[in-house]
């Protein structure tokens, strides 16, 4: 057994516990938490049984090489997370713009009184 096969599941368990705690405290959305839970479970499975899991992923996706399949899946996950984060940033920018406009209008009305 390699060192990463011990360390990666421990790190994954820590983050899974943190995700569950934040979900219970309603600080995270269910969809986001589900994505991260899936990610950490896959990391744990890959650390414990790398050949078996990567072979199944490769056969499912249709790649001949386990490594290429794993890299493809990780790249896909990163693209999904990047898209999600960029859409959240746009939504937050929109909210900040609306809030700043409301504050400016309120200050202008207060100055006129």
Image (tube, helix red, strand yellow):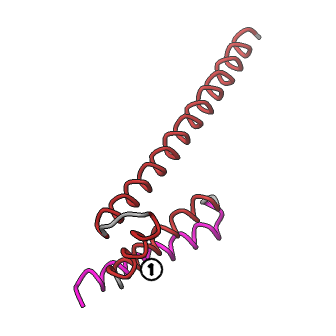
Residue displayed at 64% across by 19% down: 104
- Residue 24 picture location, percent across and down: 65, 70
Residue displayed at 60% across by 26% down: 97
Residue displayed at 47% across by 75% down: 41
Name the image quarter holding residue 33.
bottom right
Name the image quarter holding residue 76.
bottom left
Residue pushed farthest bottom? 1
Rendered position, 43 above or below 77: below
Q: Secondary structure at mark 1?
A: helix
Report the quarter where the N terminus lies. Answer: bottom left
Find the magenta span and give its range: 1-27
Rendered position, 106 above or below 9: above
Residue pushed farthest left? 2
Residue 99, magenta (yes or no): no
**Label 1 CA crowd tier, 10 Å (few <14, some 14–19, many 20+):** some
* Number of callouts: 1
- Residue 81 picture location, percent across and down: 47, 51
- Residue 49 picture location, percent across and down: 35, 84
Name the image quarter holding residue 62.
bottom left
Tell me if 15 is positioned left or right of 54 in this view. Answer: right
Residue pushed farthest top? 112
- Residue 19 picture location, percent across and down: 53, 69
Tell me if 100 is positioned left or right of 89 in this view. Answer: right
Report the quarter where the C terminus lies. Answer: top right
Q: Which SS does the magenta portion mostly show? A: helix
Q: Which residue in the structure is indicated by mark 1? A: 13
Residue 9, magenta (yes or no): yes
Residue displayed at 69% across by 17% down: 105
Tell me if 65 is positioned left or right of 105 in this view. Answer: left
């Amino acid at each position: 057994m390699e060192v990463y096969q011990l360390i990666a599941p421990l790190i994954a368990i820590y983050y899974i516990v943190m995700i569950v705690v934040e979900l219970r405290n309603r600080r995270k959305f269910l969809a986001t938490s589900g994505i991260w839970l899936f990610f950490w479970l896959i990391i744990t499975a890959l650390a414990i049984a790398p050949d078996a899991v990567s072979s199944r992923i490769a056969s499912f996706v249709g790649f001949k090489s386990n490594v290429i399949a794993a890299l493809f899946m990780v790249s896909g996950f990163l693209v999904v997370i990047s898209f999600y984060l960029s859409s959240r940033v746009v939504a937050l920018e929109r909210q900040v713009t609306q809030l700043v406009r409301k504050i400016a209008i309120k200050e202008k009305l207060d100055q006129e009184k």
